[in-house]
Image (tube, rainbow, N blue to C red):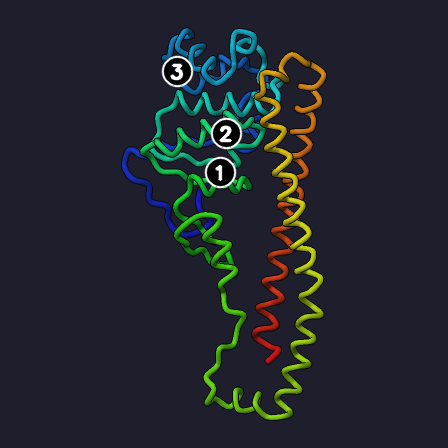
Amino acid sequence: LLPDRGLRRAAPGLRVGVFAQHQLEVMDGRRSVIAECERAAPGRTPEDLRSVLARFGLGAGHVERPVATLSGGERARLALARLWLTPCSLLLLDEPTNHLDLPLRLALEAALSAWPGSLVVVSHDRAFLDGLTERTLLVEDGRVSWLDGGWKAWLARRRDAPAGGGADGGTAPARHARSRAGRRARAEALARRRQRLRPLESELETLEGAIEAAETRRDEVDRLLVDPATHGDGEAMRALTRERDRLDRDLAGLLARWERVGAELESVRRELDGHEW
């Protein structure tokens, strides 16, 4: 997309690869799997394409199927195979671990860690971000800024941010706070602050617990899905696959709600810090 304003300067020879969260938006669902690979890598032989597809778990039974008939995980594998076939120096990855089982998520993280190019990643997979990203782009208050580190660095920044104020003890507000009227006003302000913040903080804590529980169960399901002992039970595999898809949907909803509540909480904190005292 062209920028709404300003300039985007690309280095000479820059080649960009894109992994879209919604794969059918960038792939033709009517084409076969191998035809989509041919479109991404013209000139490669069918044997080369089949070999690459097989490496991503798309064997002979998949190559002639229409893309629209693939599951979410199979479309993700096809998208990764297409990226593999298209040399580039910058990768834009939108939720690259969605629908991937644990072994493929780990393999993807290892491959990207060893890759010499640049990555821009958007993901709700906190473990993936922590193991891969080195800097974070913060979009806050209508501005974009850099933060060294990944998810944990952002959490630490939020945790360590001052609650506000920090005024010099010699200033008029500080002298007022030491007076009896000032202490009373401050106590009332603190009570109002607690009244407004407590429900949001409680909901955020509940959401974080639910997210942790869902992520833990998803990891358990992933381990069961790759356990050879499970593979002989078709019904169990289908049930686990359905549960894995449901957990992905639940996590997406929980994380979206967590972000909204967190943003509302920070907004209320900034409002109170600016006006309560």
Q: In the image, what residue type sits under mark 3? A: Pro
Q: Amino acid at mark 2?
A: Arg
Q: Which mark is residue 105?
A: 2
Q: In the image, is residue 60 above or below residue 187?
A: above
Residue type at mark 1 is Phe
* Percent coordinates x, y for residue 257 in the rendering: 66, 49
Q: Which mark is residue 42?
A: 3
Residue 43, image x and y in percent? Answer: 36, 13
Q: Could you tell me which quadrant the C terminus lies in?
A: bottom right
User: Relative to residue 273, is residue 119 drawn left or right?
Assistant: left
Q: CA distance from mark 1 to mark 3?
A: 32 Å
* Front disc: 3 or 2: 2
Which one is nearer the viewer's eye here, 31 or 169?
A: 169
For residue 215, the mark is: none
| Residue 216 locus on image (x, y percent) | 61, 38
In which quarter of the view is residue 118 placed?
A: top left
Residues tagged 3 and 2 counted as in contact (Cβ below 8 A)? no
Q: Is 45 left or right of 219, judged from the image as shown?
A: left
Up-down: is 196 above or below 37?
A: below
Marks 1/2 in contact by CB < 8 Å: the verdict is yes
| Looking at the image, residue 33 lies above or below residue 110 | above
In the image, which is nearer the foreground, mark 1 or mark 3?
1
Mark 3 is surrounded, within 10 Å at the Cα level, by few (under 14), some (14 to 19) or many (20 or more) other residues, namely few
Which residue is drawn at the image coordinates 46% and 89% (left, top)? 170
**Spatial CA span between label 1 and label 2:** 8 Å
Element type at marker 3? loop
Query: Looking at the image, which residue is at 47% across and 41% down?
Result: 129
Name the N-terminal-most of marks 1 and 2: 2
Give the residue at mark 1: 128
